[in-house]
Image: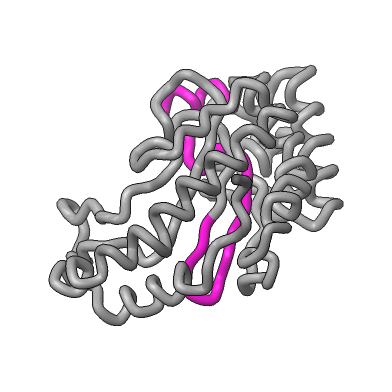
């Protein structure tokens, strides 16, 4: 059966986890996590993946943890915050044969009071950063990216954030695409208070429309990288 929306306890679970971020609480609520977060997320990926094939035929949408589903456990090895669990749900379906997070893709996120939907690649590795900058500088690919960014922004989505304060070494500081050269990743994002459609069958249509409207960013990344 097609996915019919997340239940309200999906968000309530994370609200309570935020206040009880410890292993004992999670173990006592493990069945609730399975029923309200893990299983609905798997069902979502199983329904959303085939839809995304309409615009991304090679989409990788595997409804498993460490595939489309981000694991709940945090990596605390190098963090001052030793809280064991993430307090949000993240789902990522991608295009490409590199390691998962080195591919551009389609993302959905829920946390207490907020949702996020986006496309693209959040952070470039060193190798991909070099390829990206070369593409931005390219006489054909660079203007194509400018058009894609202008189009997606005109549709009301936030595109990219400057990570660096200066144009990278080797490029003219007055480069016509200086802003894009200072990006550390390339994404299109919508975020805000959780809409009612998250809890209903219309979620698939709502997300698909957004993914399609943001897709020029994704398509450019596939072409350039």
Against 19, is 134 above or below? above
Q: Is residue 193 above or below residue 48?
A: below
Provide residue 125's location: percent of width, then percent of height.
Answer: 42, 31
Quarter the C terminus occupies? top right
Residue 10 seen in the current view: yes
Q: Is residue 184 visible?
A: no
Front residue of 97 and 141: 97
Residue at position x 84%, y 52% from top?
155
In the image, farthest residue toward the front: 1
Q: Image point 64% across, 28% down: which residue?
A: 221
189 and 111: which is toward the camera: 111
Residue 97 location (% of width, % of height): 47, 18
Q: Say if 217 sits above or below 188 in the image.
A: above
Q: Which residues are magenta?
A: 109-133
Image quadrant containing the N terminus:
top right
Image position of 100 (left or right of 116): left
Q: Quadrant of residue 187?
A: top right
Image-based side of 112 in relation to 56, left or right: left
Q: Pick the residue in front: 44 or 180.
A: 44
Q: Percent position (x, y) of residue 142?
A: 74, 26
The verdict on residue 48 being magenta is: no
Left or right, residue 176 beside residue 201? right
């Amino acid at each position: 059966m097609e996915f019919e929306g997340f239940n309200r306890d999906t968000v309530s679970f994370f609200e309570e986890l935020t206040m009880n971020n410890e292993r004992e609480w999670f173990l006592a609520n493990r069945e609730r996590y399975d029923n309200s977060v893990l299983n609905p997320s798997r069902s979502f990926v199983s329904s959303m993946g085939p839809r995304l094939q309409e615009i991304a035929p090679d989409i990788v949408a595997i409804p498993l943890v460490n595939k489309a589903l981000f694991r709940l456990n945090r990596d605390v090895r190098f963090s001052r915050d030793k809280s064991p669990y993430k307090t949000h749900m993240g789902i990522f379906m991608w295009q490409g044969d590199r390691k998962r997070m080195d591919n551009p893709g389609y993302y959905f996120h829920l946390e207490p009071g907020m949702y996020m939907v986006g496309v693209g690649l959040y952070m470039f590795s060193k190798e991909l950063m070099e390829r990206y900058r070369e593409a931005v500088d390219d006489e054909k690919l660079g203007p194509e990216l400018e058009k894609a960014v202008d189009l997606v922004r005109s549709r009301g989505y936030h595109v990219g954030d400057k990570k660096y304060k200066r144009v990278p070494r080797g490029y003219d500081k007055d480069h016509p695409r200086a802003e894009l050269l200072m990006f550390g990743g390339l994404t299109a994002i919508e975020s805000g208070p959780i809409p009612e459609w998250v809890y209903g069958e219309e979620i698939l249509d709502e997300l698909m429309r957004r993914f399609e409207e943001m897709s020029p960013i994704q398509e450019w990344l596939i072409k350039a990288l």
